[in-house]
Amino acid sequence: MKITMIDQAFEALKTFDWGADRAVLNTIDEAVASTYNDAAARAELEKKLIAALDGSLTRAGKDFVCRILMAIGTAASVPVLSKLLAQPDDAHLARFALERIPGADARQALLESLSKSKGAQLLGVIGSLGSRLEPESIVALAGLLANADENVSVAAACALGAIRNSEAAKALGSAKPASDFAKMAVIDARLACAEGLLANGKAAEALPIYKSLVGDDVPKHVKLGATRGILACAGKK
Amino acid sequence: MNCFRIVCLVAALVLSWVAVSAEQLHAQENAELMDLVVELLNDDDKDMRAVGLEQVRTELKGDAATRQLLALVPKLKPTAQAALIVAFGDRGDISALPALVEIITDNSRDVAVKAAAVQAIGALGSEADLPMLVGLLSSSSPELKAAARASLIQLRGRETLRAMSSAMASAASPVRITLMEILVERRAVEAIPNLLAAAIGSDAAVRVAAMHALGQIGTPEQLPGMVAGVLKAEPGKEREAAEKAIMFVCQRIEKVDDRAAPLLAAIEKLSPADQLSLLSTLGRVGGARSLAVIEDKISGSNSKQHELGVRAICNWPDASIANRLLDLIKSETRPELSSMLLNALIRVAPLPDDRTPEARLELLQTAMKLCQKDSERNLVLKRAPAIRSVETLRYVLTFFEQPALAAQAHEAVVELAHHRSLREPNKDEFAAALDQVLAASKDEIVRDRAQRYKNGQTWDRKSVGD
């Protein structure tokens, strides 16, 4: 009986669009909750979602599925999401899920799309890699810091600032951004890295970053932030 | 065995070396931190100094740091000195106290620096510092006086309050008054006996301050003493203020009908003449029992007592007395008392209570009809804006054509328009009224206000007379 209701809901999903009664999809939402701690049932549900996404759905339907995969998706969902990631109009829907699906497959899908994406789509992929906070993305992101497109180098700096570890700090420290806007983004990201290091008990690594940001050539707010950082590092080495 | 001893000795030496090294490292780190803080405190940029001060307040802990920072004070610029000294207060390290006292007593110091030290003592000091702070209340420097006042408000401990109350009892007049204000701000009930004594003293300014203080922190138990204060007060403003102090105490009694009881109990013990003197105070407190006493005097054959009764009922605190006032206005034969009753009606009619704005306005309109002089009619127009309704606006507009009342009516319109919550829902009506004010008023302030409200701007009441 339950399977029938889910099948009905997936059937309704095929034509679901924004503005229609969303209650027809409630069974799928309920299935997400009821399959908690039931790996087999969860995998079955994921399979149905993948099949739906691989079929013909409206944008609202894709949005619905991606938001669910964001919560329950696994490596099994990555291929279908990768396809979606390649489509400029739907790429951000795929990123909802890919940002949060744990494991190397999702990361790899995002890393591979770096070279295939451009414009806002590329900026989104960079942001998603930053949100995953994985050190494995640092090399690829660092390679974008000197990108001719100012927006790309700023996005890469922000992503590295989100990762906030020693490697990200090193990559940012040796960056040579072209524009002032990108330089400021790198400085902000370096401060973020220093804060991350300090919070993780690595004051000795955070201190040189802070010290490099108190010169007269940096804006006052950066100098204030870095000075506070130096003071916070004192005694925590 | 010897071998074991040697191993133990080596281990002890290593451990002590490690401990000493850790201590040295810690000292070195602290020294680095201190150097940076010193650099920041000397920075020309106030935001950088603020970062340093934050460290003084919260991070650099301990007596040793306090000593280092105190030694730093004379080396800083006066502004930085003052800021650092205030930060000592926030550190909460009392070991800084002797140095702060030294700064205060050093006449060569900048007054802002001394004031900062006085302020810091408020946070760190105790009753032992009270005499010095009280002494500073009579300083010729306004900065030191203000800092001492702030410090005395902050100084900790109930003992401090008792000591401050004793100091208040014996201080000279201006200091005594300041101490009363401080004690009130601290809600120091310990001071009440001394305040009651001051309320019947020979210095009028002290009496006024004491009664004011009692009005703020007194309770019904103090009413017998406060009644003595009213009797001691000079007729006029002092007496009026003393009566109001009693009114404030009585108003803090929750049940309205119980408010007069402790005052009546206090009055009963007085001579008949003093009881009569306190009728006016009873009127201010209100309530059924007060009214019974006052009515007894009004209806009596003694004209003096009748007058005192009328004066008392005119002090009534709310509009519940309105109908009785109307009756008395009609029956009163003495014009000066009749006028007084009418003024009382005009005062209470618009007072906010559970009546509708329409009912309040109707009562005020009734009062207007009873007016015989333009001064009384102008008083009605002055009170009208207390009823914030569009009907009040329409009512005051009807006086625009009467030369003797127009100016007050213009003012009433702008006063009503001042309240955005009334003006906005009736925008068109107010715009038309304000246009009339702009066309007719000769008062610059009224015109300025009218223009501002028309433009949807506000008007700062405090700016008048600045």
Image (tube, grey):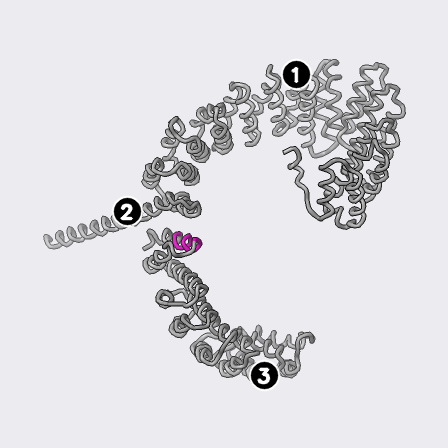
Please say if B461 is above or below A37: above
Tag 2's secondary structure? Answer: helix
Q: Amino acid at mark 2?
A: Ala
Which of B185 and B394 lies nearest the eye of the viewer?
B394
Q: Is B231 left, or right, of B176 in this rendering?
A: right
Secondary structure at badge 1 equals helix
List the residue tagged with mark 1.
B232
Mark pair 2, 1: CA separation: 67 Å
Question: Does residue A222 belong to the magenta stretch?
Answer: yes
Location of residue B79 (image quadrant)? top left
Give the chain letter at badge 1.
B
- Asked if badge 2 and badge 1 are on a common chain, one would say yes
Q: Is residue A203 left or right of residue B222?
A: left
Residue extending farthest to the left is B2
Chain under disc 2: B
Looking at the rendered structure, whether the residues under marks 3 and 2 are on a common chain is answered as no
Please tell me which residue is depicted at 89% across the width and 25% down the height of the picture. Answer: B330
Residue A189: where, in percent of width, then height?
A: 42, 63
Marks 3 and 1, how far apart in space? 93 Å
Q: Nearer the viewer, mark 3 or mark 2?
A: 2
Mark 3: give few (<14), some (14-19) or many (20+) Cα within 10 Å: some
Q: Magenta residues?
A: A220-227
Q: Which residue matches tag 2?
A: B27
Give me the disc on residue A52.
Answer: 3
